[in-house]
Image (cartoon, rainbow, N blue to C red):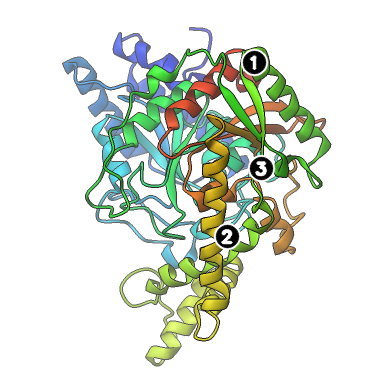
Amino acid sequence: MSEPLYSLTIGQLSPLLHQGEVSPQEVTQACLDRIAALDGQLNSYLTVDAESALTQARQAETRLRSGEVTPLTGMPLAIKDVIVTQGLRTTCASRILSNFVPPYDATVSAKLRGAGAIFLGKTNMDEFAMGSSNENSSFGAAHNPWNRDYIPGGSSGGSAVAVAADLCLGSVASDTGGSIRQPAAHCGVVGFKPTYGRVSRFGLVAFGSSLDQIGTITKDVTDCALLLQAIAGYDPKDSTSVNLLVPDYAQSLNQEIWGLKIGIPQEYYGAGLDAEVAAAVQQALDTLTSLGAELVEVSLPHTDYVVATYYLIAPAEASSNLARYDGVKYGYRDPEAKNLLELYNQTRSQGFGAEVRRRIMLGTYALSAGYYEAYYQKASQVRTLIRRDFEAALARCAVLATPVTPTPAFRIGEKVDDPLAMYMSDIFTLSANLAGIPGISVPCGLSSQGLPIGLQLLGRHFDEATLIQVAHAFERHTDFHRAKPRL
């Protein structure tokens, strides 16, 4: 075989494994060797468990011989370090959990193990998934493989880097305001955020409970369909999980989009959109039109309020969710504390990074007596209006097409001291989480600096299948997903 095993997609590798042409141990070792060679420059992994990965590979080999196989059997995957994995360190890229080893698996982790997937390790991220650049990790920033001076996006930066640099075959990650789609766009890979309730959140360390969703980062749309199939479905352990039949997402591949209506929200194409991003997205729209899709102009009138609404709701939920890290039950504990109040104060001051502390304070203020109605309650009402905007727009078309980010990736350090500029980089992704709808990012171009640009497709609740259909049609007629960073 001419291509290295680590460079293959899940779709390409699966038949080779099933036919016995290659073994899970060979593929796993190829990925581990590449991690050892390259990740010192990229910092995409926080924990690599080579010994356990090779043990899982031997188990996958036994399964393949016995015929108990799925498309993921023998596939070496990476897991974002916010999804708990039994016996494998889970830090959320925070000092406060730097030595936490979970005693149980998240539902998604258990499903992947049940499918025969192999866990290479846990990927770098913004601390507790709070950030857009991966610079908020307590263990150092991950670096964009296309240019290591640039951010890979966040919060799932490590997962996007690992997939783009062929340090795994695919990854599962979380998306609270664009944390899958934005780094996927910046690293030139495919990122999918399912509908809220489609994938169980049991065992996902909570940031914003009404916004968090687990999804996938993969090399192409086919792999997205295969990985999503394995993790989707109802889970009684998650009270927000929806008991709906999961379609066969592979059936959405290779479908034509002739006559399908695609909405173009005008609010996403105005001032502040980088000219190169606008040009790449326009070229992608032209491609979709050439495939028979019909473009329809739509409006999302409350777009101007999205960032303010999100940054009231998400920090308020974070303030509540992060109250459990108090130095008492598990995680870091300040050894110098002399009484309970000091223990709380010093543990949390030392254990949390600056961005997490900022969001806890914002959220606590928004929830405090006398301010709740003015801030959190008002934001929740505006959120309803945002959701209704999407319902009205998607009544006129099957999907919406937008940029993923206003600009290509920026330099590491460029916005780290300007939280508002950093928050604005999520302006096109936040609304899908507020509305609970599914979204996918697919590569659609490169900037003049050689940095990837992404196209975002947004769909109706629980209609992931149509997003996969449109994304795969676009991918079949373009080569952007085949471009690789030179490492």
Q: Position of residue 90 (x, y in %)?
A: 39, 54
Residue under pointer 3? 299
* Element type where label 3 sits in the image: loop
User: Is residue 332 rendered to the left or right of residue 155?
Assistant: left
Answer above or below: position of 377 versus 164: below
* Amino acid at dot 1: Thr
Q: CA distance from mark 3 to mark 1?
A: 28 Å
Q: Earlier in the sequence, mark 3 or mark 1?
A: 3
Q: Residue at x 45, y 89 (%)?
A: 342
Q: Earlier in the sequence, mark 1 or mark 2?
A: 2
Q: Position of residue 381 (x, y in %)?
A: 52, 64
Q: Earlier in the sequence, mark 2 or mark 3?
A: 3
Q: Residues within 10 Å of mark 3 (few under 14, many from 20)?
A: some
Q: Residue at x 46, y 78 (%)?
A: 347
Nearest to the observer: residue 44 or residue 481? 481
Q: Residue at x 45, y 68 (%)?
A: 96
Q: Position of residue 160 (x, y in %)?
A: 55, 38
* Element type where label 2 sits in the image: helix
Q: Are marks 1 and 2 in contact (CB under 8 Å)?
A: no
* Amino acid at dot 3: Ser
Residue under pointer 2? 310
Residue under pointer 1? 478
Q: Residue at x 64, y 16 (%)?
A: 479
